[in-house]
Amino acid sequence: MRWVTRRRAGGALVVLALVAGVSGCDSGDDISGDEDQPRSAASQATETPEVATVLTLQHVGDRLDAAHREKVKDGVTPVVDSFFDGAYLGDFPREDFSAGFASFTEGAAADAQRDLELLTSASLSDRIETATATKRRVTLDVLAVEGHARGATAHFFLDFDTTGDLEESLRVRGELYLTKQDGVWSVFGYDVDEPEVLA
């Protein structure tokens, strides 16, 4: 696994707060729950995923009211969806995975380009024709300050089926570390495992 938390000027306090206040939370073992209603990225994506992402708030405390919790879900879901769709899913072979990092900070996107073998389906690209999601699950730990969300850790897993020379059912899991600035959520770090074959 790789751990990246590069932030540019003014971000040190955000990183420290997230590591201390969010990353120490539960690792998201209950991420597989199916009882939650799907939330799509239709507000920002050109196409709604065939399998919608299920996002659950896990550790929030009483710092966020119901309205702010919904805003967090609505803001974070498209960020995770763009990563899923651009990094792992779609038509293959291809070499360009930059769409998966569109919601990353500049530094994190640069790091991700160096981690393509880990962070995308690049290692499978010449053996598959399509990768289609079968399950998209996210649980979110939120750092709130004075009733407003400032950062979050998204624990995720993505299940997908491939076609082509390699026909498998795969799962990738990991964490995305997010910050909110000027009302916009972005990924500044990640900790992601290599895809595993589902039994």
Image (cartoon, helix red, strand yellow):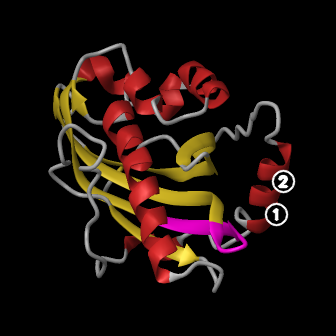
Residue occupying image coordinates x 71% and y 62%: 23
Q: Quick check: 191 left or right of 34?
A: right
Residue occupying image coordinates x 41% and y 39%: 83
Name the amino acid, label 2. Answer: Leu
Name the amino acid, label 1. Answer: Ala
Q: Nearer the viewer, residue 32 or 99?
A: 99
Residue occupying image coordinates x 18% and y 47%: 48
The image's mark for residue 20 is 1
Residue occupying image coordinates x 54% and y 47%: 185
Residue 5's x, y, as percent? 73, 40
Q: SS for tag 2?
A: helix
Residue 123's x, y, as percent? 41, 24
Q: SS for tag 1?
A: helix
In this picture, which residue range is highlighted in magenta? 139-148
Q: CA distance from mark 1 to mark 2?
A: 6 Å
The image quarter in which residue 19 lies: bottom right
Vertical comparison of 174 with 74: above or below: above
Q: Are marks 1 and 2 in contact (CB under 8 Å)?
A: yes
